[in-house]
Amino acid sequence: MAYSELVKNFERIRDYLRQFYIYGFKSRTEYDKKSARSYDNERRRLESWLGDYMRFRQTADGKNVFLSVDSRSIPGNPLHQAFKAKSFTAGDVTFHFYVLDLLQSGESYTAQQILDLFWGKYLSCFETSWEPDLSTVRKKLKEYVSLGILRAEKKGRELYFNRAEDRVPLEAWKEAAAFFSEADPLGVVGSTVLDKLPEQPACFRFKHHYILHAADSQILLQLLTAIREKRRIKLINAGKRHPDSQYWHFVLPLRIYVSTQSGRQYLLCYHNRYHDLQFFRLDYIRQLELLEEETEYQTYLDDWEKFRSHLWGTSSGIGWNVDRLEMTVRFEDNETYIPQRLEREKRNGRVELPDANTARYTVETYDASELLPWLRTFIGRIESLECSDPAVVKRFYEDLEQTCALYGGES
């Protein structure tokens, strides 16, 4: 099979990218889903986009390749390039140039007139195997209208097409597009806008920047479409335990959650089978298909409003049972940033100030163990820690004892 940089099936690229460069760090000998030639072709394709950011290490099992990116030194997410390499058939390319040349004068034509002009003005001059029919032309015209390349206008009973004018002054939006391309989960849109500019701005750098989840942009767009149109979906979720799963889940998508700690993206949905709200990680979703509209969508949103009132992260515990946790911290007169931070990061909890140097944080949540990484950031200031689930407090102090032992705390 000849190597080509262009892509037909992005899910395959996403799988290779994830298994070899983001999470897997696999060597060629460890990958047995496809032939060695297929692996080499996909590797070369990825290296053509990401070659400047690839590193490797040699192990006993072979050569492992991985991504190494300092987000402070690059103007844009390199993973966006994967969405800009798309393959086209000979007919796609021929149609593109013919229709733009035909409409460049500003005239408007119906689909039938465009097809007739194709034959009379272009195809009759060459020996070609491309023989478009009216149905194909209509589908392509509809696609170009959705992409903003053409404009459709109804005149009587006929639909006329002409070239769309670029009325947006992109130069005035370049800084906004540059920020959007890196800060938004669908930043690939901003990156595509920047490609139309003669010079891309380099005014932003990000110290803590989660670029890896750009590979999930296509899945995210479909989910946002389903949420906007209030449609049910079916999806294949292949997590760590079942990487080769082909089981379809039928769900109603409600909200997208993005972790500020890891950058991971989650879908919150109502699961038809379990009759409950459930989270799916977007990087585990393999396939997705939009289904019918849900007429009682607001009812499920009301359930979500009740559900999120006790949600800390993405765990609902067992049966929506609520744990109560209370932490008291001590701070000095010149450390007013401590209660300010508690107030800023409290989520569904509440903060009280019993006196000028004490802050009490209280929260009722489904799974108090999710707070442990956050609670550890207050070590050295905590005066008391209580929880209705004793296992949470026990684990907190056991982890603290292990840390002290590791760093010589006993001596």
Image (cartoon, rainbow, N blue to C red):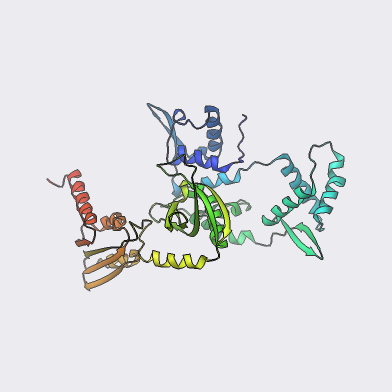
* Residue under the image location 27 percent in, 56 percent down: 377
Residue at x 75%, y 48% (from the top left corner): 136
Asked whether 275 or 213 is in front, the reply is 275
The picture places residue 290, in percent across and down from the top left corner, at 57, 54
Q: Is residue 347 left or right of residue 37?
A: left
Left or right, residue 380 beside residue 49: left
Task: Decide which of 247, 85 is in the foreground and name it.
Answer: 247
Q: Picture coordinates of residue 130 (x, y %)?
A: 78, 40
The quadrant in which the C terminus is found is top left
Q: Quadrant of residue 173?
A: bottom right
Establish if 42 lies above or below 101: above
Give the vertical position of 302 relative to 373 (above or below). below
Q: Residue at x 54, y 47 (%)?
A: 80
Q: Is residue 184 visible from the viewing direction of this image? A: no
Q: Quadrant of the N terminus?
A: top right
Expressed as whole percent of the image width and height from the top left, the position of residue 51 reads 51, 37
Q: Answer with left or right where residue 401 lies relative to residue 58.
A: left
Q: Is residue 55 above or below residue 256?
A: above
Q: How many marks?
A: 0
Residue 84 makes an appearance in the image: yes
**Residue 34's x, y, as percent?**
52, 31
Tell which of 226 and 353 is nearer to you.
226
Q: Relative to the observer, which residue lies in front, 96 or 364? A: 364
